[in-house]
Image: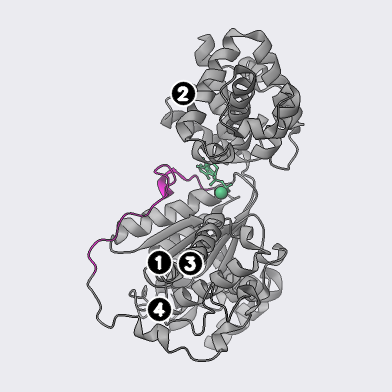
Amino acid sequence: MTDLWNEALQGLQPRLGQETYELWLRPLTVAAVEGRTIRLRAPSLFMKEWFENHYMEAVLDELEARTDSRYVLDLEVDPTARQPTEPGRAEPAAAEPHPGSQTNPQLGGHREATTSAPQVASVATHPTVEIPRQVAPPPVGLSERYRFDTFISGASNELAASAARAAAEQPGTRFNPLLIYGGVGLGKTHLLHAVGHSLYESDPSRRITYLSAERFMNEFISAVRHNLFDQFRRKYREDCDVLLIDDIQFIAGRDRTMDEFFHVFNALYEAGKQIMVTSDRTPSDMEGMEERITSRLNWGLVADIKSPDLETRVAILRQKAEAERIAIAGDVTVYLAQQVQSNVRELEGALVRVATFADLKGVPITTGFIREVIGETTKERRSAPITVEAVQKAVASHFSVRIADLKGPRRHKGISRPRMIAMFLSRELTGSSFPEIGLRFGGKDHSTVINACKRITKLSAEDPELRSAVDHLREQLSR
Ligand code: ADP
Ligand code: MG
């Protein structure tokens, strides 16, 4: 019987592809055969469900073609499946060149450090007594809104969402590491946060570390500079049960940071800790990323997110409108979803913009009103994302001020107006968060950015000249 099973799977391989076969079919094992019922074991609930929803039919057809009889496949989750690993102690990665030390001036040049000379000193610094942990501090930096129950699944993100759920169900097992990649504003960060929330809620003793790759780099550099590397190392290699890193492509080409990430990855992976990263491209497209890192990122599951289809966009708009208590009729929602196709961030931005203007004018949201507000620009949006830097540049040149002044502290009206407009447009067009925008404007507080956006919304309604400047800039940037 097992032979028939294997033959059927092999027969399917050319049709489904090698990758599908390896990932979803081969891990299933035949547990028993009773008449026309084949009992199969899957390594996890996720694998079981994915198989049932996607490949079961094809396998049944193949079996029927070979035997002329219809079988029933009955799947169970393997009871001996590897359980989430208990937080153990990470092996100290051997011979990490000590940052800042004279003997290793070139950190990034130390390629295959894991096989280097034994290190004695670091072993002594590890305590041998395990201190029982009760509750870890809640993960820092996770947005309350980004949870699984606010994530709408559709064909465009199904694999990524399912894999994220599986990683949250059984961390450190099959989908480790998990890499989610896709274009801007498609929900990568949302899923990353959702995994963090879920893992913390199911076990509050888990130490969950979430941060952007940029922040990882900055912390690393600062640790090296201030001789706090031991602390850094402990934080990421030892006192961490789940590592969530956003926009990992950022470290490509930054040798020292890549080297450090490599060691962190190894330490956590070997200790069975879940690692999840997001990226705007596949590992093989990460120019400047070391091969030893891209190959590790491919060890687990790499899942993509594509632009959402109309149905998903409508569902997302409905949810958002409900959460923000925006009154918008069903057919109008569909119309808006048809206008904004590129990504979810723009879609949400368009809804908020339309709702804000409708509110200011005291009119209901209709298709005509949407057309008026978002115009034709969104439809022809170029695919490259608009950056805060591009907004600053356009605003600076429009008002003939210096970019340095936009980022600086001067409160003179000739500067502060353009600065507020630049903040407003950054918020509207780039989808960056308030703190992020503040940071890019010379490290201003997020409340300054919020106030700027409020002011400009209000002024646009009162001052036609200002409104036309904003409209002009928006159009110019969106072209
Ligand atoms: P990315 O990290 O891919 O650039 P984000 O995760 O920041 O994108 O998503 C942008 C916005 O769109 C967020 O507000 C997020 O909540 C929302 N979003 C994206 N995808 C979905 C989805 N499938 N369901 C609900 N909201 C979504
Ligand atoms: Mg993101």
> Label 2 neighbourhood size at 10 Å, few (<14), some (14-19), many (20+)?
some
The residue where tag 4 is placed is: 90
The residue where tag 3 is placed is: 275
Residue 370, given in percent of the width and then of the height, sits at 62, 20
Residue 190, given in percent of the width and then of the height, sits at 49, 48
Q: Is residue 150 above or below residue 17?
A: above
Label 2–label 1 contact, CB within 8 A? no
Disc nearest the viewer among 2 and 4: 4
Q: Which residue sits at x=39%, y=43%?
A: 144
Residue 406, given in percent of the width and then of the height, sits at 63, 30
- Tell me the CA gap for discs 2 and 4: 49 Å
Q: Which residue sits at x=61%, y=72%?
A: 293
First in sequence: mark 3 vs mark 4:
4
The amino acid type, in three-letter code, at marker 1 is Lys
Disc nearest the viewer among 1 and 4: 1
The magenta segment: 133-153
First in sequence: mark 2 vs mark 3:
3
Label 3–label 1 contact, CB within 8 A? no
